[in-house]
Image (cartoon, rainbow, N blue to C red):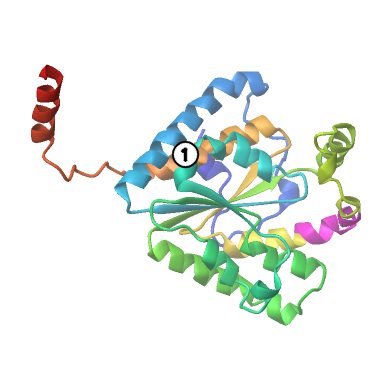
Amino acid sequence: MNYSEQFKVAPGSKVRLKDMDPSFKGGHKNNKATAEETEHYQKKLRGLQDLMYAEGKHSLLICLQAMDTGGKDGTINHVLGAMNPQGCRVAEFKQPSAEELAHDFLWRAHRAAPARREVVIFNRSHYEDVLVVRVHNLVTEAIWSRRYDQINAFEKGLVANDTHILKFYLHISKEEQLKRFKERLDDPAKQWKISEADYTERGFWGDYVAAYEEALSRCSTEHAPWFVIPANHKWFRNLAIGRIVVQQLESLQMKYPRPTVDIERIRRQYHAAQRA
C-alpha cells in the first residue's frame, strides 16, 4: 500500500476531516502484527539519514501538527528517534518570545530550518500562526488570511535550496483525545503534562477543525505536501510515517561521495602496519 499517495492531501483539494477515519489501520490487526515492519523502516531511516549526511546535498524538514495528545512527541520518539542525533534535531514552536514577536511570524521558522545534511523536526510549526491565532482571535482575519500564501512562498524558497518538506497532521478523534487525557490522569509519569487548558481547549474543537482544514487545503503543494495520518492507533501512525519518510528519502537517489584520498595507498599503509 502506497501511504505516500493514500494519505497525501492532493494540491487544490478541499479537506474534510470528518470524511477521514482516524481509526484506519490499513488491514493490520494490532501493534504486534506491524512491529517487524516498523522496525524495518526505522533501520532504513537510520541508513538513509547517514547517506544524506555523507552526500551533503540535501536537507529534510518534517512538520508535525495535531490536536492536543495527537502524538507529536510519540512520533518523534518511536519513528524519528531512530536517526543519528548528530544530523537530526527537534525545534519546538510554543508561545512566541518577545524577540520572536518583534519579527515577522516566519522569522523563527526560518531560523530553525535545516542546513544541508540535516533532518529537522518541527514539533508544532509555523502553521500555529494560522491555527491558534485564528481560533483565539490573536490577530485579525485580515492578517491570518494572507499568511497561507506567505507560508507557501516560504516553503517554496526552502525547497529551491534543496530542503525537502514533509508535513504530517496526526488525525485523532475527539473521543480518543479524551481517552488519552484520562491516561495522563492515571499515569504519574504523565501527570506533569496536564493543564486546565487541555479541557477548555476542547470547547474550540470545531474551530480548530475548520482552521486545520483550511491550512491543509491551501498549503498542500507538490513541493511541500501535507499528509493526514490516521493516529487513533499509535502503532499504525508510526508505521505510516516511517514508510512515507523512507519513500521520500529513497526518491532522492542519494549516493555516497567518492573518497578524497588514495584508497589503495591507504590500504598499502594498513597492510604494512599489520606486518610491522
Which residue appears at 55% of the width and 40% of the height? 80
Q: Position of residue 243 (x, y in %)?
A: 51, 36
Amino acid marked by disc 1: Asn
Residue appearing at x 57%, y 65% in the figure: 109
Q: Nearer the viewer, residue 117 or 20?
A: 117
Quarter where residue 254 is shown: top left
Q: What is the chief secondary structure element of the magenta stretch?
A: helix
Compared with residue 152, is residue 56 higher up or lower down, i.e. above or below?
Answer: above
Q: Are there few (<14), some (14-19), or many (20+) residues within 10 Å of tag 1?
A: some
Q: Left or right: where does residue 238 sit relative to residue 248?
A: right
Whether residue 252 can be seen here = no
Q: Is residue 4 visible?
A: yes
- Residue placed most toward the observer, 251 or 14: 251
Q: Residue 147 falls in which quadrant of the image?
A: bottom right
Magenta region includes residue 205: yes
| Picture layout, residue 239 above or below residue 65 | above
**Seen from this angle, which residue lies furthest front?**
276
Position of 152 with respect to 67 (left or right) is left
Image point 59% across, 22% down: which residue?
Answer: 35
Can you say which quadrant of the picture contains the C terminus? Answer: top left
> In the picture provided, is 194 more to the left or to the right than 105?
right
Nearer to the camera, 102 or 34: 102
Secondary structure at numbered mark 1: loop
The span picked out in magenta is 200-209
Residue 69 belongs to the span the image colors magenta:
no
Q: Is residue 136 above or below residue 93?
A: below
Instruction: Name the residue beneath numbered marker 1.
Output: 84
